[in-house]
Image (cartoon, rainbow, N blue to C red):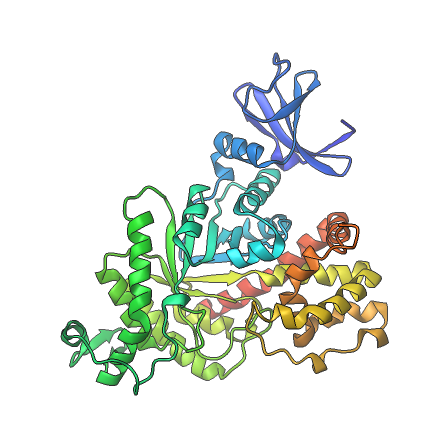
Amino acid sequence: MGELKVYINSVNNIFSAAVYMADDNGKTVIITEEPGNNGQSALGFAAGDVGGGKFRAELTHENACALRRLFPWTAPVRGLSRPASFGLGDRLGIAAPGHIDLFKNNDVFPVFAQQSIRELNLTNRTYEDVLDAATFAVFREGYKKGFGADGDHLKTAKDVEYALSLGFTMITLDCSDYIKNNVNAENAPPLSQYYKDKYLNREFFIEDFVLVFSEDELRQCAAIYAGAVSFAADIYKNFFASGKYDADFEISIDETFSVTAPLQHFFTARELLDAGVKFAAIAPRFCGEFQKGIDYIGDTAQFEKEIRIHAAVARHLGHKLSIHSGSDKFSVFAAIGRETRGCFHIKTAGTNWLEAMRITARKDPPLYRAIHCFALSVFEDAKKYYHVTTDLSQIPDISAMKDEDLPEMFNNNGARQLIHITYGFILRQKNDDGSFMFRDRLYNLWRENEDEYRAALVKHIGKHLELLFEGVKS
């Protein structure tokens, strides 16, 4: 064991022992000081005896579990009952310290561990790794305000059980496979008497709005969303109804081609409630485009008009609105904050990766140039996983750019989306000898520039919160 640099915020005493994290020649480890113990740690860590009553433990899943047992504040908790909550999809497992710097100073509940199965597959990570990275960061930084863990956009009972069994405190159920996008007024089947009795010829008074279903609108609602309601009800019954798992349940109906009209939001939520499903949030598919890593595309006035009704529906029925692909939607954040009255869940993910890559462009221009060219070569394959309308012709030719200008690429929408959606290919690509082409070099660079990355996240995610709460105050 080399000379240790102790992370002072991580020092905690328990029983007669001290537990903390330290940098051991560039590697973060857990150290326990247990006077009188020799040979084996009595705290449950898989650790090596380094003498003098000290033990050195690696950052493994087993040791993350030990931390969560010993220090409950390093384990996730439920948080969607809080007015404002914010999902922080850390695809790299290194962003949480920067997130902590920001969220320790405000009242927004952070979800530090948030990943979809798609993201796990693209980065070769596991839910164990995602949760453990958050636990280690929380312990290292001494953050005790509570955080969440979200199994995001899960589509199967198997994946839901996987996340819940590890202690994830939020499940976002992706119902897109059960939503019929091709239904319209012409091909929707006839209504059952159940729906007619429940909704037709009735006025639903919701704050300043009156919702009324025409027969065609109701036929479409039933045809499009009935399968999603049934699927969500089955998942709820199997995993949530018994109270076995202490987790929030979010319903995602946003991964579709068709916009969720406020009437459809109302219909879906009412049907879920009447099926006995207790859920914390619904994520509709809003009008306009919520594409990855760039600002809102669409008529902001129309968005504001519709989210006003969506927010009223959510308040009336007792859940909160969840805004997915919420990264960098600066032109509509004020409207979101204002119309939800500060009661929202915003999901971000790839914007943290983009800030890391902005630092790469600044600190190692040759590496960034190589990655940029590689991203162009795999872009069409990456588009299979994400909906974007990127115009590659609008991306500057980096061969004609000076090194000092490369970070400006991250102010270009095309370049942002190019790097955003190719992250999995970049991180997984290997050389002929089996070594990673980019991954190890990137992680070494980010470790060396951790303080700069932390500051970048505080600034960038902080801008999201600033605009959201400007809307609340207006």
Give the residue at x 57% y 60%: 349
Residue 382, placed above or below residue 258: above
Determine which quarter of the picture holds residue 278.
Answer: bottom left
Q: Is residue 199 left or right of residue 151?
A: left
Q: Residue furthest front?
A: 432
From the viewer's perspective, is residue 334 above or below residue 213? above
- Residue 334 image point, x, y percent: 49, 72
Q: Position of residue 97 (x, y in %)?
A: 62, 48
* Residue displayed at 25% across by 66% down: 270
Quarter of image, res 399: bottom right
Is there any visible trace of residue 417 in the rendered image? no
* Residue at the limit of the structure toward the bottom, as seen here: 186
Residue, x 64% and y 59% (percent of image)?
424
Is residue 85 in view? yes
Left or right relative to 217: residue 70: right
- Side of 204 where 405 appears, left or right: right
Foreground: 68 or 300? Answer: 68
Residue 85 place in picture, x, y as percent: 46, 57
Q: Report the quarter where the C terminus lies.
A: bottom left
Residue drawn at (63%, 25%) of the image: 47
- Of 88 and 474, which appears nearest the observer? 88
Q: Position of residue 443 (x, y in %)?
A: 73, 50
Which quadrant of the figure contains the N terminus? top right
Please count the marks in the image: 0
The quarter holding residue 405 reads bottom right
